[in-house]
Image (tube, grey):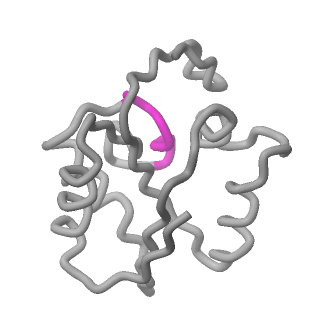
Amino acid sequence: MKITVGKLGDIDFKNGYYVYVGSALGGLRQRLKRHLKREKKKRWHIDYLLEHAKVESIFVWLSKKGIEDKIACKLMKKFDYINGFGSSDSKCKSHLFYSKDKDQLVTALFKALRRQSVFVEF
């Protein structure tokens, strides 16, 4: 599916599974509620994708420091990604990763973190 994503322009999204790595320092509950709303003003790249995608799972890691760049850089080495997606203030080229295989993507995410998580299934 082709989706126009803000200043990134038109992007072809393949059929499959995507993991978006982000942070919500100081407002996790509010950030997740906002992302899960169908009607909202588009502010972040993920807002454009979520207008067309189904959220299946949310994984939450609590950390006192920002770790999303480290996770994103590790996932970049193993998966296809959308260049510039969610990474305007990051050292990594992307924060959105793709795989046809959901289990492979989730396993790599957990390996990148090597921590316990709180898992929420939708």
Number of marks: 0
Q: Is residue 11 magenta?
A: no
Q: Is residue 87 magenta?
A: yes
Residue 4 drawn at (x, y percent): 63, 18
Residue depicted at x 78% and y 46%: 38
Residue 48 left/right relative to 58: right
Q: Up-down: is 52 above or below 102?
A: above
| Residue farthest front in this picture | 122
Residue 31 left/right relative to 2: right
Q: Up-down: is 6 above or below 112?
A: above
Range shown magenta: 82-89
Residue depicted at x 55% and y 21%: 8
Residue 108 drawn at (x, y percent): 18, 58
Residue depicted at x 59% and y 19%: 3
Q: Main secondary structure of the magenta part?
A: loop
Q: Quadrant of the C terminus?
A: bottom right
Residue 47 drawn at (x, y percent): 67, 41
Residue 115 drawn at (x, y percent): 25, 83
Q: Up-down: is 3 above or below 29?
A: above
Residue depicted at x 43% and y 69%: 59
